[in-house]
Amino acid sequence: MMRVLLVANVPTPYNIPPLERIKEDSGWLLTVCYISTSNQDIGWAEELLDPQVAHETLVLDRQRPRLKWLLGSQTAATASLLEKLRRERPDYLIIYGYTRMPQVAAMAWAAATGTPFAVLGDANLYADCAVGMRRMIKRFWLRQVTERAAALITVGTTNRMFWESYGARPEKTFESHYAVDNDFFARGVARRQSEATALRERLGLAGKVVFLYVGRLVGRKGIDLLIHAVKSLAEENVAVAIAGGGPERAALEALTGGDPRVVFVGRVAYAELPLYYALADALVLPSRHEPWGLVINEAMASGLAVIAHHHCGAAVDLVGPDNGVALESFSVAELAEAMRLIAADGERRRAMQARSVEKIQQWSIQAFAHGIIRAVQTSARPRLAPPVISELGKLK
């Protein structure tokens, strides 16, 4: 039985379901090492560490609290990870990301011991904005990564393009479609329709075509563009619901100028997201910089049309005229026109919503997990490779 160790940043609602599926379908002894449980930029709750999960979990920076207090979470996590690697000597490493200290240390250990490793992440060629000396250093480092990794697991087209720009060879790249738990959102939306209707009434959204934003309220997300766009529309049957919290909330509320068509609902717990997708007609993700954008997966599983910039990772693979609008620019006028298009034609909007549900079925937790399993089984040394699980043979 192959011993596989996966290094991830923090537990999130997105990584736990595929990890459980990997454990169930691979036959591996799977250990997941989280660097920490907290991340200010994302803010997932610690209770996401479910003690009932089948795979072994370890929070690295908790193992050395004194070192964490003295030198910080990254140093403590790195020391804990290197000790675990030395003690247990796994057969294969899966490393999510490539910049943080524990990730770099894991790659160095793998190179020193001859242990194969795969790199997984959502980096996007169009969001690769490093310049000058930083660009030179990044290029040198990632060429080392692409050369030494046994596998580069790509979650979508722009992610594959990113690795190819740093010299990744075709035989080292393996596709694994980035996914959310589609059934969780589909079932939740269906179950909470009556609640959503009542919430529409309370928020003053009844009878309106509702465009939903879900995410942090920070500058790069482009929420100011969305507010300017809805304010530019003469149509009174259009409204925007903004779900999320962050440092820009007060400034964004001021930007609305009291327009009643813009409603801030505050930060929404993951378990409550289906309620807000159920009250909406379309998702808008106007981010200026978005490596992937899993809210697009969520919205499509929930039966929404989607508006997003065409360089957003998820939009490249998932958004087109059949289920929404892929924006060519960050102009208020183009965004407003896309909203007008979707709001004005109910029949077309419903067709887009139905198409979203159809398209997202191919981007499932099972397909995501099995893509990772395939990458590891194919790139592991023959002496380490476990028997191929029967279910994988059914996937083409």
Image: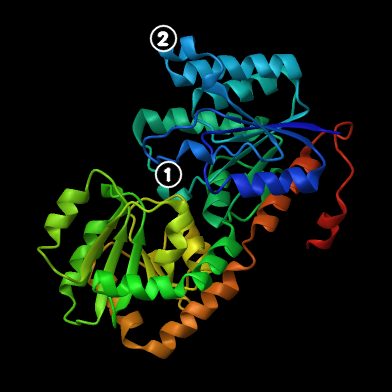
Q: Amino acid at mark 1?
A: Asp
Residue in the picture at 49% in, 16% down: 75
Of labels 2 and 1, earlier in sequence is: 2
Residue in the picture at 42% in, 17% down: 72
Residue 1, position as x, y percentages in the image? 86, 34
Dividing the picture into quarters, in which one does residue 50 lie? Answer: top right
Q: Is residue 337 left or right of residue 94?
A: left
Residue 265, position as x, y percentages in the image? 28, 59
Question: How many marks are shown on the rendered structure?
Answer: 2
Q: Amino acid at mark 2?
A: Leu
* 114 over 22 or under it: above or below: above
* 33 over 271 or under it: above or below: above
Point out which mark residue 93 bears.
Answer: none
Is residue 35 visible to the viewer in this orientation of the structure? yes
Residue in the picture at 30% in, 48% down: 245
Q: Is residue 87 left or right of residue 140?
A: right
The span from disc 2 to disc 1 (Cα, nearest Å) is 33 Å
Q: Is residue 57 left or right of residue 73?
A: right
Q: Considering the numbered disc 2 on the image, is that residue within a helix, a strand or a loop?
A: helix
In the image, 196 versus 387, the foreground residue is 196
In the image, 156 versus 351, the foreground residue is 351
Dividing the picture into quarters, in which one does residue 115 lie? Answer: top right
Q: Considering the numbered disc 1 on the image, is that residue within a helix, a strand or a loop?
A: loop
In the image, 223 versus 136, the foreground residue is 223
Mark 2 or mark 1: which is in front?
2
Residue 122, position as x, y percentages in the image? 52, 46
Query: Quick one: quadrant of the C terminus?
Result: bottom right
Point out which mark residue 128 bears.
Answer: 1
- Give the residue at mark 2: 70
Crowding at dot 2, Cα within 10 Å, few <14 / some 14-19 / many 20+, comes out as: few
* 163 over 29 or under it: above or below: below
